[in-house]
Amino acid sequence: MLELTGSGAEPLEAEDPRRIGSIPLAGRLGAGGMGRVYLGVREGRYVAVKQLLSSVVGEDQDFLRRFGHELDNLARLPADATAPLLDSDRTATPPWFATAYIPGLTLREAIALHGGPLPVRALWLLLREAAAGLVAVHALDMVHRDLKPSNIMLTLDGLTLIDFGVARAAEQSQLTRTGMVVGTPAYMAPEQASGRRRLSGATDVFALGSVLAYAACGQPPFGDESGHGVLYRIVHEEPDLEPLRELEPDLAELVATCLDKDPEGRPTAAELLERACAHGPFTDPLWPEAVTERLAERAAFAAHVQEPDVPTIPLTGEKAEPEPEPGKEPAAAAPAPPATVRPEPTERRRRTRVLLAVLPVVVVAGGTTLAVQHLPYTSAPQAGAGNSPSAPVTAPADPTASAAGGSPSGTAAPAQPPAQDPGQAGTGAPPAGAAGGVGGAAPGTEPGGDPGSGAGGAQPGSGGAANSGNAGNPANAGGSGSTRPSNGGTSTAPTTAAPPAPPASGTYRFRNGNNSKCITQVFGASDYGDCADASARWTVQGRPDGSFKLVNERGGGCLYANMLGQAVFVGDCSNGTAQLWRTGSGGSLRNDFSGGCLDLGMSGGLVTKTCGGEASQRWTRQS
């Protein structure tokens, strides 16, 4: 087994692959909601291999196109700005890519290891190195969008910016056009928090100012919670820079200009680089002693590449040689046909400097940063049997509904929830032709609540019944005007299912069943508050497929969701599944994008969570 001491990686787990593409894997660097990052070996060097989760990708072609566009942008970035892209397969199932492995520590890890804020000299060095990386990025008209301590990797010779999975040419950003908010609340710029302005290099400068304040003070300048409170302070209040002013007044003044509410009032990355260079020269060791020692361990690991002992996997159609029985002579092998000789590939020019980078994913697992986090796809979760392809799903099936008689029907009903009580959001009756199959089969769920493939799940919209274990139980699935028997049952007469009826249009308040508060808006974020508040009124804009948008009467923005467990925001009402909601059982509001139900956040604000029928997910509609 490969020795991982000093690498920052953990041993592979039972469910982890041993090889991705042609790259053998040695350990796991981290995991997040979008995928996993592994330590691999390619062409005599360590690499970080990011593999997306199958449950995230599904059959979403739009997501795959945008993911390919992100890889194209990553390939454009210069090697001195981030970990270079070395290999990828965007057509694989699931897709993956590999970048140089960076033997470093995130800024968050370094501060924890040091035991407190960085010294003044290290702060100016941090500014110089980060600003230099942003200069290269901004020169390509790209924006990082999520600069934060866990996306800055300190190394023995400086630092590297990572998590460019969401970087893209600003004028081509699908996220900007649909009003999606990408970033970490505590390090967002005001224009990100409100979603009202086009992002630019000034957005990254604001985030860098917050990062410097964190490195000098131990916490972000507007607080470190993830709810609406920090967004409000970013937009309306002044940053807390007192500890930095006492430590280094000159740097505090510069950070204050980075945190200007107006993007036009902030310095450029090039101007920050010039100011920081004036405080040099910076000599070794660059970082505090404890940090430098750990970085030396990482660099020593990267300098001696070990080849993982991974068995060769036979190609498709080949059979592996059986193990010989103990004490028995193996049979003589037939003469092998002449081997096809392939020309050796021309050796690529290698950099003498070993780049260590952890790539695009999402969160941190065991202190390892992953990159490619905020890549929301724009189609609803799909239900299917195992990994078999399924027809596009307009909305997730209702996991709490069941067929007549109380047992699963094994058939997929149209994406229309059961009828609601008069006081619940969006009433509506089941469509005609769905008798006996109203409940449908629910999509499976991945650990953590992400909608995924469920064994025996139905394929909504295909017009046929899917097998969930009830042989011979025919039921109508709707969609194509005909039905199929389930597991060999007799066919029923062809019927045509009526399209789901949209909820009644109008303007309402939505009161929570747990705390009796109503959905409100606080600038670019959603919240729960007094039902008499002017921002508590939402206009329902119904669509023919039964989904609807909730438009805030006061601000004019639409309620939209990110991934499961993440905050729900209010922003641009452009087309996109993130802004589409449906009524679910018990008065819940289910989002087409995340597949989750609107719920109360842990410390404030609203989130989407796996639908479970809790009182906190019940929203009563009131005029």
Image: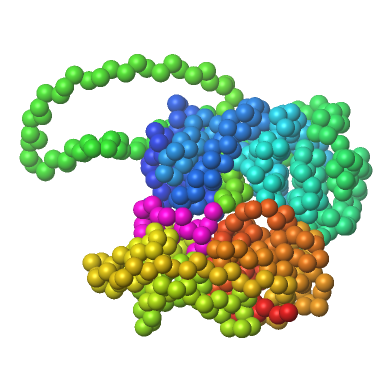
Foreground pick, 3 / 367: 367
Which residue is located at x 11 percent, y 43 percent? 325
Is residue 163 at least partly visible in the picture?
Answer: no
Image-quadrant location for residue 100: top right
Residue occupying image coordinates x 22% and y 36%: 318
Q: Residue at x 78, y 29 (%)?
A: 282
The image shows residue 289 at horizontal and vertical percentages of 70, 39
Q: Position of residue 295 (x, y in %)?
A: 62, 37
Q: Quadrant of the N terminus?
A: top left
Judge whether residue 144 is colored magenta: no
Question: Bounds of the magenta span?
Answer: 379-398
Residue 145 rendering spot, x and y as whole percentages: 70, 44
Left or right side of 322 for 343? right
- Residue occupying image coordinates x 55% and y 70%: 501
In this rendering, would 5 be left or right of 147?
left
Q: In this view of the protein, which residue sits in the foreground, 249 or 621?
A: 621
Of the 4 image quadrants, the one containing the C terminus is bottom right
395 within the magenta span: yes
- Does residue 75 lie above or below 424 as drawn? above
Magenta-drawn stretch, dominant element (helix, strand or loop) = loop
Q: Is residue 62 above or below residue 568?
A: above
Q: How many marks?
A: 0
Q: Is residue 278 visible?
A: yes
Tell me if residue 4 comes above or below residue 532 in the rendering.
Answer: above
Image coordinates for residue 248, horizontal then vertical, percent:
89, 43
